Amino acid sequence: MLLVTEQPVTASDKTFIQLRQDIVEGDILSGSKLSETELATRYAVSRAIVREAINRLENCHLVERKPNVGARVVALSPERLVSLYQVRESLEGMAARLAATNMTDDEIDDLQALLNAHLQTVQSGDTYYQEAGDVDFHYRIILGSKNDHLISMLIEGIYHLIRMYRVQLGMAGPRVTTAFDEHRSIARAIDNRDGELAEILMRRHIFYTRNNLEQKLLEAVG
Amino acid sequence: MLLVTEQPVTASDKTFIQLRQDIVEGDILSGSKLSETELATRYAVSRAIVREAINRLENCHLVERKPNVGARVVALSPERLVSLYQVRESLEGMAARLAATNMTDDEIDDLQALLNAHLQTVQSGDTYYQEAGDVDFHYRIILGSKNDHLISMLIEGIYHLIRMYRVQLGMAGPRVTTAFDEHRSIARAIDNRDGELAEILMRRHIFYTRNNLEQKLLEAVG
DNA sequence: AATGGCTATATTGTCGACAATATTGGGAAT
DNA sequence: ATTCCCAATATTGTCGACAATATAGCCATT
């Protein structure tokens, strides 16, 4: 169940993906400065490569760059979380609606099978499930929309920033099983080809997730 | 009433903006290949600058790049138009809803004043009005949403691709005055702080615009 | 002691050259 | 005549060096 969609070919690709992972997973702290020379030595590539990677990360909203000054990893804040999740709610809600129309029967079967696999993982108590699993569920529905611009804006645009909030704030406790049930409901609506319901359920699901993360963020920062 | 929001500071900025304009306005044909060396001589900068500009254009969805092969200007097609406008409808509908809540009274007054100015232009028969005017109306509502991620995705993301369709397909005839009336209705809903209605009207407005462009595109290409 | 300006330093922006990869064209074999 | 392979060419990818800009620290002045 691996995501093999992005295959790095150039050195810039590899550095971009590596740097992105280091930021998302907190190896490079949120809010810290990104020195081009430092990263160049760290990843053993030239500064040009690092610059290109940073430019790409800017489009993912993972870093902010100021001309002649440099780039910083974005800071995680409640305001930004709300702003991000408002957009996410709108776009993924739309994706769910479109997926109910545009996914093939086979793709829907695969989606159900995926959820069955997730159920196993949830029951086994492996909390790490949420990390790749939830993402993968949303990932498939996004692709199922079959709308190229929507897919691009979500996957290449804000996907990893969303991951960054989840990974750094953690996602455990009762929310895991609740979220799983919500996924079930969404999949059922899609299976019934009920786009309207799928959109409503997806929006609601994302809204709940936002509240959960917002609370964790307020606890963490104060 | 000029948009002075983006101030180029580096050579890369200037080249990016210039190249973007040349693509949007059709000086560089849709679908054509972008040679780095050719553009470097054309704009009298180094290849590194051109590369950075092309990378940025990729995020605007104005060019598509293949590793080790090169970049091409995107092709305009009915399918892509539909895909783009589905996303636009969702995002700008949301922007209108948020603007009804988040714009200040002064900003709303300015918006009304802008429409009055547009009315003058429409009545004087200057069809070029639609170009900057319509854009500016939408631009203000997007900013009025006060949602940073939404603003970024629309203005830096798909704004210029939308412009490209409009500029290259032209926008004249009865649609101009109809669109103006629709703008009036949206502004009125925002003035009444009726976000729900503003969203519905904005979505409808964008849907009509899409149909208009789609028809022109089918006429043009066959 | 505080502030303002200047110099030294570090960092980013830009460039031209070289390396690696794709494309094109011609020649040979079937 | 067609197809396959190989060499020649052109284009993109990568690098290190230099230029321009911002930052930090020190000294002089008040």
Image (cartoon, coloured by chain):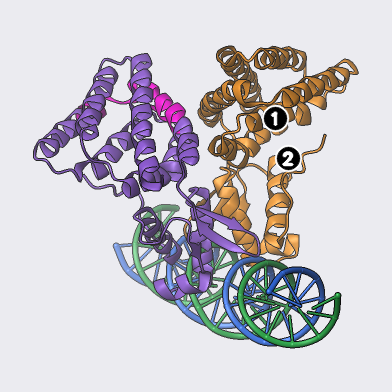
Chain colours: A purple, B orange, C blue, D green
The residue tagged with tag 1: helix, strand or loop?
helix
Q: Where's the C terminus of chain A, which quadrant?
A: top left
Estimate the x, y position of residue A191 in percent, counting from the top left. 25, 19
Whether residue B206 is situated above or below residue A5 in the rendered picture: above
Whether residue B133 is situated above or below residue A157 in the rendered picture: above
Magenta residues span A88-109
Q: Is residue B2 left or right of residue B190?
A: right
**Is the residue under label 1 in contact with that under label 2 (CB below 8 Å)?**
no
The first of marks 2 and 1 along the sequence is 2
- Chain assignment, label 2: B
Q: Residue at x 18, y 43 (%)?
A: A127
Q: Amino acid at mark 2?
A: Glu
Whether residue C10 is situated above or below residue B65 in the rendered picture: below
Residue corresponding to mark 1:
B140
- Confirm whether the magenta stretch covers residue A104: yes
Estimate the x, y position of residue A6 in percent, counting from the top left. 36, 51
Examine the rendering and report whether any part of residue B75 can be seen: no
Estimate the x, y position of residue A164 in percent, counting from the top left. 38, 48
Q: Residue at x 26, y 15 (%)?
A: A192
Mark 1, Cα crowd under 10 Å, few <14 / some 14-19 / many 20+, is some
Q: Residue at x 71, y 30 (%)?
A: B135
The residue tagged with tag 2: helix, strand or loop?
loop
* Res B25 label: 2
Q: Quadrant of residue A129?
A: top left
Q: Where's the N terminus of chain A, which quadrant?
A: top left
Q: Residue at x 14, y 31 (%)?
A: A116
